[in-house]
Image (cartoon, rainbow, N blue to C red):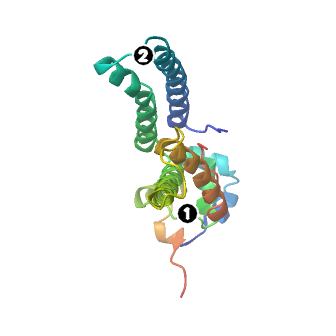
Amino acid sequence: MKNRLKVLRAERDWSQADLAERLGVSRQSVNAIEKGRYDPSLPLAFTISQVFNLPIEEIFSPDEG
Amino acid sequence: MTKCASPAARRYIVRVASLMALYLVVLFVAKWTFNAIQPTGPIAWALAIAPALPLIGVFWAVMRLLVEETDEYIRMLFVRQCLFATGFCLTITTIWQWLQNFDLVPAGNGGFGAAFFWFIGLGFGALYNRLTIGDWGNVW
């Protein structure tokens, strides 16, 4: 799964720690999701969607191929 | 070696540290009593089992951490660590069993039970996470 977390975070001038605090998870989690090493659960994806005020499909997209 | 990041991980550390301290005390008392008065019957059985109880408590602490950790990524890392530890422990004990079956190693295990290898496996599990996912996790 690809995601635009890093770009969306940068647009808001948030650090990984800032986003982690808003999501109620560790900075390690944000880092892992951002780098595509971990795909979040549906509940966490919805929380991310709420924090950025964007639909999930504008943040996450399936890998091509 | 431990790095704490969540309240659940901190509770885990306190629980494990307390249980290991209790283990040392119980082990000392059991060994001393067996040497000093050579108990028999139910008392001997109770004393022999006593050091196992704090170790069983550590298994409980591990399971509680899996339940109480609210960060799903950190929990996933710890689940992988536990699965790695279980596989490691089963592998070592199965190999040892077959070496014994063909009389290539002496009977017994030198006092090292499955729990010892499981805890070693937990450490290797953290290394496995680091190599495959890039994170050690919070408890290693």
What residue did someone put label 1 on?
Answer: A38
Question: Pointer 2 indicates a residue of which chain?
Answer: B
* Whether residue A24 can be seen here: no
B131 w.r.t. A17: above or below: below
A32 w.r.t. B70: above or below: below
Question: Residue drawn at (46%, 61%), measured in percent from left and top?
Answer: B98
Front residue (pair B136, B53)? B53
Return the residue found at the far top: B37
Mark 1, residues whose alpha carbon is within 10 Å: few (<14), some, or many (≥20)? some
Question: Residue drawn at (71%, 53%), measured in percent from left and top?
Answer: A13
**Local secondary structure at mark 2:** loop
Return the residue found at the far bottom: A65
The residue type indicated by label 1 comes to Tyr
**Local secondary structure at mark 1:** loop
Q: Which mark is residue B59?
A: none
Q: Quarter of the image for the C terminus of chain B: give it.
A: top right
Q: Which mark is residue B38?
A: 2
Front residue (pair B38, B6)? B38
The residue type indicated by label 2 comes to Gln
Question: Pointer 1 indicates a residue of which chain?
Answer: A
Q: Quarter of the image for the N terminus of chain B: give it.
A: top right
Q: Position of residue B135 (x, y in %)?
A: 64, 55
Question: Residue drawn at (45%, 18%), measured in percent from left and top?
Answer: B34
B21 w.r.t. A43: above or below: above
Do the residues bearing badges 1 and 2 touch, measured as CB atoms within 8 Å?
no
Return the residue found at the far front: B103
Q: Position of residue B80 (x, y in %)?
A: 51, 56
Q: Position of residue B132 (x, y in %)?
A: 62, 64
Question: Residue drawn at (46%, 40%), measured in percent from left and top?
Answer: B62
Left-right relation of B46 to B75: left
Discs 1 and 2 carry the same chain letter: no
**Which marked residue is nearer to the observer: mark 1 or mark 2?**
2
